Image (cartoon, rainbow, N blue to C red):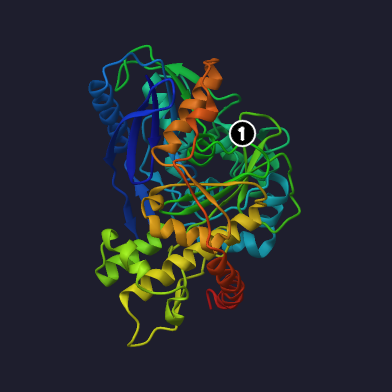
Amino acid sequence: MYVGIDVGTSVVKAAAFDSGGRQLAVESRPVELSLRDGFVEQDMDEVYGGVVDVLGRLTGRVPEPVELAGLTGQGDGVWLVDGEGRPVRSALSWMDGRAHELLDQWLADGTFETVFRRTGGAMFPGSPGPLLAWLDRYDPKSLDAAAAAVYCKDMVFQRLTGAARATTDVSDASMPFLDPRTRSYDNRVVELLGLTRRRRLLPPIGDPIATGEARGEGLPSGTRLSNGPYDLPACALGAGVTSPGDGLLIVGTCLAALVATTELDLGSEPAGLYISTDRPGHRLRAMPAMVGTAALDWVLSTTGVTHAEVNDLLASTPPGAHGVRVLPYFAPSGERAPFVEPHLRAELSGVSLETTRADLVRATCEGIGYAARHCLEAAGLTGSLAVCGGGTRSPAWMQLLADVLGRPLRVVEGEVGARGAVLAAAERYGVSLDARVWTEPTMIVEPDPGRSAYYAKGFQEHLVRLDVARGTAGR
């Protein structure tokens, strides 16, 4: 069997596949996030322990030889480790907002745009550049004690394999220090962010992705393992999004819009990033928004609605939700794609005493759909669109999304990131797997022409309201 490991932000998963891509079993375990006053951290030992636990349960449940394993996980943030991959301090999550003042300063003095023009990465508070600069200013002892500032999957890979030193890959390194043309670190960017004396902390880049053998924790000793790509490009691989112009929308805690491209436009509005892939010259134009199912979860918990009720509620109120509108920017760190505005917050309008729970739920789903359309258009979608993530479990929401986006959706279910991690590992090890068969969609959802026309106008109205909100953000 083939094993994919996906070290998510709130859940760690391991999935087993047969040689034809059929998902045999999945094991998962939740991991905690510590949230306080904009600080969002994770316990690395808990995360690593979760990985070992789910792998042990998976290999015990499907007692077949493991041909190879691929590793993926959450990107961004800062995971400070010692020489053995063990934590120096708690990991700073990509959701962390503590560095927003530094980002405000860089937005004002032009550093933010200069970095984008060099790397194609639009920094946000939870990206490594701002977080490392914050640590250098307020917690320098942690940086002094660290051997490397890595990403989540890199810590896991080093500890699973016992590698002598930490490494990352071109996908994780893409934000914000990687020059996408040379596929190496841009030392001028390091200098611009005031981190020259911390340059030693940036881990070597495995290009192609690093490989190693498991040392017996979770996976059988000697199992071949590859490190990367991180979860966004892994999902693109797992959904079959590799041809220029084709796109993927990940409907998860946050939305992530990805479009495959061979172009590199560093002159566009600074937003999102270009994710380098294992194929030189091939990239993903990514718009990973902060908005996503977390916005809907907040509305559901506030109104006392369960996820099981969403389908019926969406069917009980018409498009437009009786005039209720939602700008769904609920994240405490604002928004990062397809624009960067750390101070943007959610807005609800058109609400009255006659507004129902169904109106609020539909308006939120529509708002998330408009945000997704904004991201996909900015990323340059011209071809087919695949969709994956937890949001795909609601048929009514998938139909609403198809209508709002005005295009068919190739819905890919199951553990798409873990599937992509296996395909990346197979490519790296020269193992022949039929990627077309592995990435077949579960279903195709066609848009309704009448509703799509309605939502095309609604999208333009959304952009107008968004412009007003961005103009007053932070005041």
Residue found at x 50% / y 30%: 228
Residue 61 visible, this orientation: yes
Q: Residue most toward the bottom? A: 353
Q: Quadrant of residue 303?
A: bottom left
Q: Looking at the picture, which amino acid does disc 1 mark? A: Thr
**Of residues 384 and 171, the one drawn nearer to the viewer in this rendering:** 384
Decide: few, some or many residues near mark 1? Use Cα within 10 Å; few <14, some 14-19, many ≥20.
many
* Circle 1 residue: 277
The relative height of residue 215 versus residue 449 in the rendered view (above or below) is above
Image position, residue 338 (x, y; %): 60, 59
Please provide percent x and percent y for residue 279: 65, 29
Residue drawn at 43 percent across, 64 percent down: 332
Residue ranking furthest to the front = 449
In this rendering, the answer to whether 43 lies above or below 354 is above
* Rendered-image quadrant of the N terminus: top left
Up/down of 131 relative to 19, above or below: below
Which residue sits at x=46%, y=81%?
A: 323
Q: Nearer the viewer, residue 337 or 457?
A: 457
Q: Judge whether 408 appears above or below 45 on screen.
A: below
355 or 220: nearer the eye?
355
Question: Is 268 positioned to the left or the right of 34 in the image?
Answer: right
Percent position of residue 88, x then y: 38, 36
Give the percent coordinates (x, y) of residue 382.
67, 50
Query: Visible in this render: residue 329?
Result: no
Using residue 203 as the reference point, say whether residue 378 is left or right of it: right
Q: Quadrant of residue 268?
A: bottom right
Comparing 173 with 464, the one in front is 464
Looking at the rendered structure, the secondary structure element under dot 1 is loop
**Residue at position x 44%, y 79% from top?**
324
Number of marks in the image? 1
